[in-house]
Amino acid sequence: MSSYDQKDDLVRQSMVLYDFCTKNHYENIEEIKDLGSGLNFKKKGLNKLIKDIIENKVDRIILTHKDRLLRFGSDLLINIAKHFNTETIILNDKKQSFEEELSNDVLEIITVFSAKLYGSRSHKNKKKTLK
């Protein structure tokens, strides 16, 4: 999830994934939750997942949507997982048109950079008020 505002969505996704795993009799489930941009490759959970895949500790990755893994780069990570015999299941694998995917990507980039811009301005303003 990108922000704390989307925490309710994270809870819903968690319930959907848990129900799917229960119905399919998957055991030894580990849920990884990360808050942060889909452009952030430094997220703790993401890096743990990559490490566990490389160490052959992961049989399958189950996602509600492909972009929940990464906004850009999810195909790369899915291919790497496949080479380590890790299956990837995407519950809502709705194919988007090129235009839909492009507009979503552009919106994601604008959101991330505007958050950085406003975050840095806010940090600078806090410093000014403390002086």
Image (cartoon, helix red, strand yellow):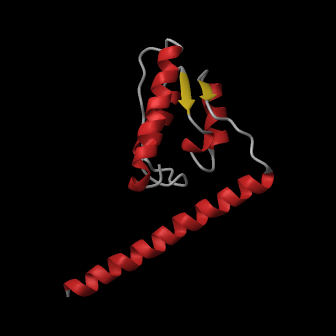
- The residue nearer to you, when weighing 114 against 39, is 114
Identified at 49% across, 11% down, the residue is: 25
Identified at 44% across, 33% down, the residue is: 14
Q: Image check: 78 left or right of 31?
A: right
Q: How many marks?
A: 0
Identified at 68% across, 35% down, the residue is: 93
- 119 versus 52 height, above or below: below
Q: Position of residue 102 (x, y in %)?
A: 73, 57
- Quarter containing the C terminus: bottom left
Q: Which residue, as the protein is rendered here, is positioned at the far top? A: 25
Identified at 61% across, 38% down, the residue is: 77
Q: Position of residue 26 (x, y in %)?
A: 49, 15
- 70 versus 32 height, above or below: below
Residue 58 can be seen, yes or no: no
Residue 29 can be seen, yes or no: yes
- 50 versus 98 height, above or below: above
Q: Position of residue 112 (x, y in %)?
A: 52, 64
Q: Which residue, as the protein is rendered here, is positioned at the far right? A: 98
Q: Image check: 129 left or right of 12?
A: left
Q: Position of residue 74 (x, y in %)?
A: 62, 42
Q: Image check: 97 left or right of 14?
A: right
Query: Residue 83: which quarter of the image?
Result: top right
Q: Which residue, as the protein is rendered here, is positioned at the far left? A: 131
Q: Image check: 88 left or right of 28?
A: right
